[in-house]
Image (cartoon, rainbow, N blue to C red):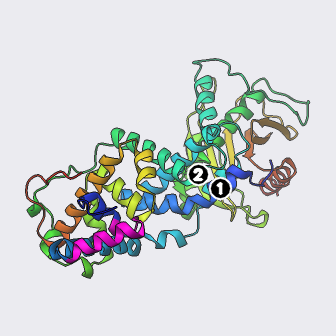
Amino acid sequence: MSKREITEADLQAWVDGRLPGDERAQVEAWLADHPKDAERLEQYRRLNEALHGAYDSVLDEPVPGHFSALVRRTHRPRAMRHAAVVAWCALAGVLGAVGGWQSRDWYARRDVMPSAQMFARQAAVAHAVYSREVRHPVEVGADQEKHLVSWLSKRIGSQLRVPHLGEQGYGLVGGRLLPGTPDERSPIALFMYQDSKGQRLTLYVRTDAAESSETAFRFAQEKSVGVFYWVDQKLGYALSGEVEKDELLRIANAVYKQLNP
Amino acid sequence: MRADLDEFGAHAASVIPRLRRYARALTGDTLLADDLVQDTLERALIKRHLWREGSDLRAWMFTIMHNVYVNQLRSRPAEAPVTLDAEAYNVASRASPVDMLEVGDIDAAIRRLPAEQREVLLLVALEQLSYAETAQALGIPLGTVMSRLYRARERVRGLLDGSAPQGILKVVK
C-alpha cells in the first residue's frame, strides 16, 4: 500500500491495536506530523486502560451460584422460567391444563386427597418461579426470621415453624407470601433455602382445609423439579428442589422431624 | 439430574465473568447488571440450538445480551436522557486530564453516553471484540461502529477534560 489518505477509522484502529504492521507504520508516520491528533489518540488509549482499571475487578468476583446452576441445567430443552409462566396461566384457570406437566412416580397411593396432585404442582411452579429470582427471591430475609414466621403465621391462619436445615447443608434465605388458588381460601407461605453452591430448595406450606389427617410422603416430578409433599396437623407441606430424589427425601425427612420433635 | 456440563454449558459458564464485567460497565449497577446477565443466560439456553458449535460463543452471547438490554431499556425508560450540555455534568467541571482518571470519573463519564455509543465503546475497548464482531452483535454496519466509537471517545474525552464537544461533531468515515 503506497501513500493513501489516513482516515479517522484508521486512527481508531491504531488506538485499539487492530492495524497490521505496515498500516500501523503509516499511521505512526502520519501522527508524527499531526501532534494534536497524536495527543488525542494517546488520550483514547489511556481511556481504554482506564476502562480496564475500572471494571476488570468484576472478572475476579465469584460467580453467583444461580448463574452456574443455570448453565449446569443445559440438558433441559427450555429454560424453566418459561414453562413456569405457562403453568401459572394454567393455574389461574386460563388454560385449564397444560401438556407436559404430568405428575408421575407416586411415592404412596394411600390417602390421596382430591387436590393433592394440584398441590404438588403448585408447589413445583412456585419453586420454578421464585428459586430463579436473583434480586427478589424472598420478601422477608432470614435476618428477620422472627418477623417472617409471625407474619406468615398470621396470614395463613396457622402457627408456623420454620425448619433449620444447616445440618443438611442448606441455609434459610427467607420467605414470602403467595396468594391461594381460587379453591383455597388460605394464602401460602413459601420458605426458601440455599446451599453453598446456590442450589435452592423451597418449602411450600398451606393450611389444609380439606382433610386434616396425616398422610405419608408422596413424591411428584414436575419437569426438572422434584416435590415431596405431605399433610401434618392441618398443614400441607411440599418440599421442592432440582436435586436427586434421594437427596430431597433426606431433607424432607429432616423437615418432618424438626416439625414433629 | 446430572450435574455435569455439556459442551455448551461449559462454554457458557466460562463466558459468565465477561458478561458480568460488560453488564456492570453498561448499567453501572450491580443488581441491574446481574439481572441482565441472568436474562441473557436464560435466552441463550432457550436459543442454544441457534449457536453453531465451534463458533465464538462469547460474541454470540454479547449479541443476545444486546437484544435483552435493548428490550430492558424500552421497558425501563427511567434512564436519564443524555444531553450535550457540558455544564450539566459535574464531572466536566473537574477538568481532570484523562491520565489522572479515577474509577468513579470514568464510570460517571460513560454513564453520560447514549446507550448505543456506550455499547460500542465497551465491546471494543473493554471486551476486545473485533469491529466486525461488534457490528454483528449490535446489528449495525461496520461504518456505524467506527463513527459511534469515535463519538463515544470524543464525548468521554471532552467530559473528562472539561471541554465537552460543542454542537455536532463532524461525521467521519
Left or right, residue A194 beside residue B114: right
What residue appears at the point 74 percent right and 61 percent down from the top-left corner? A165
Image side of residue A254 versus residue B98, left or right: right
Percent from the top left, x then y, of residue B41? 57, 48
Q: Which mark is residue B11?
A: 1
Sequence-first tag of 1 and 2: 1
> Is residue A117 in sight in this rendering?
yes
What amino acid does circle 1 point to? His
Q: Is residue A223 left or right of residue B84?
A: right
Residue under the image location 32 percent in, 56 percent down: B118
* Residue B137, placed above or below residue A169: above
In three-dimensional space, the C-alpha distance between marks 1 and 2, rounded to whole angstroms, equals 7 Å
Q: Amino acid at mark 2?
A: Leu
Q: Chain of mark 2?
A: B
Q: Is residue A30 magenta?
A: yes
Give whichever of A243, A150 is nearer the camera: A243
| Magenta-colored stretch includes residue A11 | no
Q: Position of residue B144 (x, y in %)?
A: 30, 47
Q: What's the magenta region?
A: A14-32
Contact check, label 1 and label 2, Cβ < 8 Å? yes
SS category of the residue bearing label 1: helix
Residue B3: give x, y in percent of width and height: 78, 54
Chain that bears disc 1 = B
Looking at the image, is A47 positioned above or below residue B35?
below
Q: Is residue B165 left or right of residue B42?
A: left
Give the number of the disc on residue B57.
2
- The image quadrant that residue A196 belongs to is bottom right
The residue lying at 36 percent from left, 38 percent from top is B75
- The image's mark for residue A61 is none
Q: Position of residue A114 (x, y in %)?
A: 78, 23
Regarding residue A161, the answer to whether it shows in the image is no
